[in-house]
Amino acid sequence: MLAYLIRRIIAVIMMVLVVLLTTFSIFYLLPKWSGQDLAVVYAGKGTSPEALEGIRNKLGLDEPVLAQFWEFVKGIPMGRDYANGADDVTHCDAPCLGYSFRTETSVWDALTSALPVTGALALGACIMWLVGGVAVGVLSALKRGSFWDRTAMIGALSGVSMPIFFTGMIMMGVFVHSLGLLKLDDELTSSDSIGVWFETLLLPWIALAFLQAAMYARLTRATMLEVMGEDYIRTARSKGLGEQAVIIRHALRSTMTPILTVFGLDLGVLMGGAILTEQTFGLKGIGYEAVNAVGSKDLPVILGVTLIAALAIAVANLVVDIMYAVIDPRVRLG
Amino acid sequence: MTAPLHDTPAEAAPSEVSGAADQAGAKKVEGRSLKQIAWNRLKQDKLALAGAVIVLVLVIVSVFAPLIVDLFGHPPTEFNQDKLDPLTNLPQGALGGVSAEHWFGVEPNNGRDIFSRIIYGARVSMLVAFLAAILAVVLGTLFGIIAGFFGGWVDAVISRVMDVLLAFPQLLFIISLVSVLPNDLFGLTGSGVRIMILILVIGFFGWPYVGRIVRGQTLSLREREYVEAARSLGGGSRHILFRELLPNLVAPITVYTTLMIPTNILTEAALSFLGAGVRPPTASWGGMLRDALGTYEHDPMFMVFPGLAIFITVLAFNLFGDGLRDALDPKGTR
């Protein structure tokens, strides 16, 4: 078990490094090939050549890409020093992700202050969609072919066919602008009360949960139907177990395995920034930071977001695999 | 030696899909009847047929977009300031200016005809979704079949690459990539470049999904007797891959391609919504929703039409894809 964990954690780190290196190379190499200078991107056009040279020196832009990448990675556990001149040194404490090209603030601070918004959005929505989606899916599978089943499945298919920025705008239009039932806070901070957070996040939760629940309902139904046809369900029934016990203790258990896989991955993706949801509802989370950073070519912030996103996905994968062994006794880790 | 190799196993292949192991004489009939069974099932699925009809209409509309727009006489980039309220810049008249002349009304701020822009937007959507799906399926099938068939280190390398690609924060990566790519590439400029980039990027990130399915199928198919028979008759790897295995993978690949197109439409819309899609003034549904995000409180119809266009298109493809999957499923009971 321990050996397995260590092996997997190394794999997670490798995976994240590959993703980072790819992003890093694209941002450092592509501009070079198309004749852009990153120092100009940083300082703006019209900066004097001497100043540009200083920036290159300070940020290490004149070094080879791999050396720069190494500096960046090393900065995460060790911290990093930026030399402004001969004896003027800015120290960036570990975990150092560098400073934003645009706002000159620490990327780590910017991301950690955006994380609670994304986290609250993802966690609230995931509870709603997991419970809702699985419940609808199980009911549909048990009443296969009934009116309820058909209605639910057409509803679910419609749900997966709607982009969230459309449902989100409809919901905001109706509940915020037409009926005036809710008020959205422009910028959620830790000093806002739980009530404000709840009011602001309610619509995003529902919009996100609706979309995802539709997917989960379809997946649950399909898996459940397959499981109910297995031999061990027949065995459980024939030994005299009540239908409820058969469904809850036997069928639901193995139905949950594939759903858990998808759930872990979805949650991982969301934790790295629910880009579309945040953009639609104007929530200032990780995804919002990401889109802003991309728009202004703020490389350190983009790298920081990529790091968080890749890490979230890789860790979610690992957790899912471990949970597998807990839920499904047939799975052995090794 | 070659002649029987080309004949017998290739004909044996279709019967393998239907799961029926008949005698040699009945093989040809079996091969046809599978298609007939599928077609008969599909004919009875009214929702799938409705989806197919809508898809067909959309394809025709996209191909003949210039003709249709000519018929109504409002080019998609023509400004109609006279249709706007001079004070608010919102469309005059009810429902965002819906009239006999402008079926879907006009855009706020510049008065462009929404109907024409929806028609032209269909072009972008369809082009990107279809070509990206084809790219993903070609790459996925090729690498999946090679990984599954050869196993060993070839499989290990391809599987790791797929793992890394699936762990990529895709949306974030794509918007970052688009932001650094130059505006003219390979002799294309403006929206042409963007459309090509969209196709390449969406297709590239789509292939691992196809690859995993094809690999899994290949793994189970390569142990079948007919593959062994072909090998003992002296069939080379290439013969077995493309003459024996590939025909048996056609059904799952077809289903997956059909279901991939709606996903691609949603991705293209999402990218355009985030500003990484085609450039203005070229019309795209996601881009229209991006524009609508600023004005939907005052002019909701500007958001409703492109939103519905995406919804109906994606739903139609999903209905058709689901029906096709059920129809081609050898275990299907409906």
Image (cartoon, coloured by chain):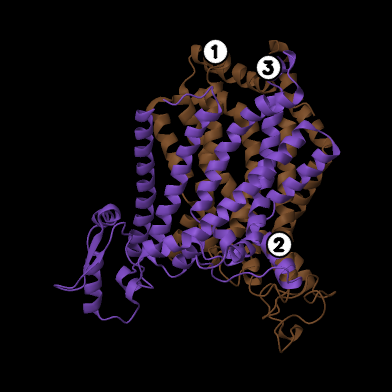
Chain colours: A purple, B brown
Q: Which residue is mark 2?
A: B307
Give SS at disc 3. Answer: helix
Q: Position of residue A269 (x, y in %)?
A: 51, 49
Q: Are marks 2 and 1 in contact (CB under 8 Å)?
A: no
Identify the amino acid type marked 3. Answer: Asp
**Identity of the amino acid at label 2?**
Gly
Question: Would residue B191 appear left or right of A88 to someone viewing this image?
Answer: right
Q: Amino acid at mark 1?
A: Ala
Q: Position of residue B87 (x, y in %)?
A: 71, 89
Image quarter for residue B110? Answer: bottom right
Q: Residue at x 82, y 40 (%)?
A: A148
Q: Is residue B131 above or below residue A41?
A: above
Viewer-nearest of labels 2 and 1? 2
Q: Quadrant of residue B32?
A: top right
Mark 2 on the same chain as mark 3:
no
Helix, strand or loop under label 1: helix
Q: Is residue B145 above or below residue B204?
A: above
SS at mark 2?
Answer: helix
Task: Determine the residue positioned at 55% across, 32% down.
Answer: B214
Instruction: Looking at the picture, tell me which residue is in the foreground, B129 or B296.
Output: B296
**In the current view of this chain or complex, which residue is farthest to the left?**
A86
- Chain of the residue under label 2: B
Sequence-earlier tag: 2 or 1: 1
Against B71, residue B326 (above or below) is above
Q: Which residue is mark 1?
A: B229
Say if mark 2 contacts mark 3, CB within 8 Å. Answer: no
Q: Position of residue B275 (x, y in %)?
A: 55, 66
Question: Which residue is under mark 3?
Answer: A231
Q: Give the CA separation, mark 2 to mark 1.
A: 54 Å
Mark 2 Cα shell of 10 Å, populated few (<14), some (14-19), many (≥20): many
Between B164 and B240, the one nearer to me in the picture: B164
- Left or right: A100 with respect to B296? left
